[in-house]
Image (cartoon, rainbow, N blue to C red):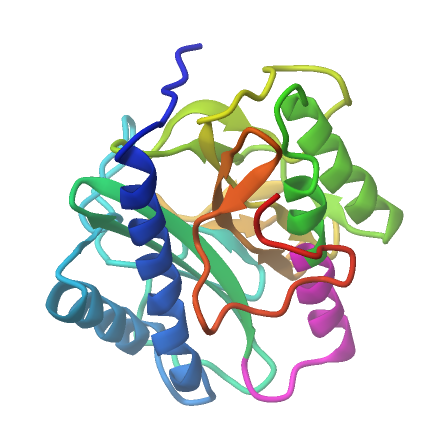
Amino acid sequence: MTITIKSGADIPALRIAGRLASEVLDMLTPHVKPGITTEQLDKLAHDYIVNVQQAIPAPLNYTPAGYIPYPKSICTSVNHQVCHGIPNDRALKNGDIVNIDVTVIKDGWHGDTSRMFVVGEGSIAAKRLCAFTYEAMWKGIAKVKPGARLGDIGHAIQSFAESNGFSIVREFCGHGIGQVFHEEPQVLHYGRPGTLEELVPGMVFTIEPMINAGRREIKETGDGWTIVTKDRSLSAQWEHTLMVTETGYEVFTLSEGSPALPAFISSTST
């Protein structure tokens, strides 16, 4: 496993890319309401990234091995869609939940983040899933410090989610990021404490748990990208990009519109 360690000028560049990705979500927030299509959200995001931020939407035409090129600039995963949902002309309805996943490239560096949105008036169950998934992400982030292990992150997320009656998607994980969209290490959202790679200052990666209200099993749809729950239960995901610092962590994907921190988190950097 070759993990690139970031230092020097890399870090301010990553901070900028991360903030820009979060600001795309800030811009989209007032538009996420009943009646808008995910395709319209994609166009808003694309135009903002390209024309206002003068950056590049990383997902557009992204083609990892074994995949067809991704056709849009953001991912929009609605209700039982787990991840990689392709924006289309389906209008969002009152009560839907949607994950919007944004990755921008600015001056060669990637910033990757996602948030959940409840469209209109969501059910208690939907709002609970979104809230607990957000807390699960931060449970993982809180474990990040030099000397900790990747397994500590996964275990914190898994134990919190499963103790509250949810299941963890295991086929997708967080990832290293920098000048490459997806690099080492893989950051599992389940596992055993004290296992896997040791964290060292300068490692930059995402934590992005996908948590289902029902069973954890998933399947790919016919479009070659969209992943859904097999039992059609709701799924939620949140994502931040962060760096291991000398004393803990620094979250890069933050902006003025970022959601409030959970009660057990006092700072976005330690």
Q: Is residue 193 above or below residue 242?
A: above
Residue 67 among those drawn in magenta = no
Quarter of the picture containing the C terminus is top right
Residue occupying the point 11% across, 69% down: 51
Q: Is residue 86 visible?
A: no
Q: Quadrant of residue 22?
A: bottom left
- Residue 124 is inside the magenta segment: yes
Question: Could you tell me which residue is drawn at 82 percent across and 39 percent down?
Answer: 159
The image quadrant where one finds the N terminus is top left
Position of residue 11 relative to residue 152, above or below, is: below
Above or below for 172 versus 96: above
Measured as percent of width and height from the top left, residue 14 is found at 32, 43
Nearer the observer, 267 or 197:
267
Residue nearer the viewer, 193 or 133 = 193
Q: Can you give x and y, in whole percent of width and height, for residue 192 in the image?
A: 77, 22
Residue 266: image quadrant is: bottom right
* Secondary structure mainly formed by the magenta segment: helix
What's the residue at 70%, 15% (across, down)? Answer: 195
The residue positioned 31% from the left and 60% from the top of the image is: 20
Q: Residue furthest right?
A: 163
Rendered location of residue 267, percent (x, y): 64, 55
Decide which of 52, 76 is in the foreground and name it. Answer: 52
Tell me if I can see residue 45 in this picture.
yes
Residue farthest along the top direction in this orientation: 1
- The magenta stretch is 119-134
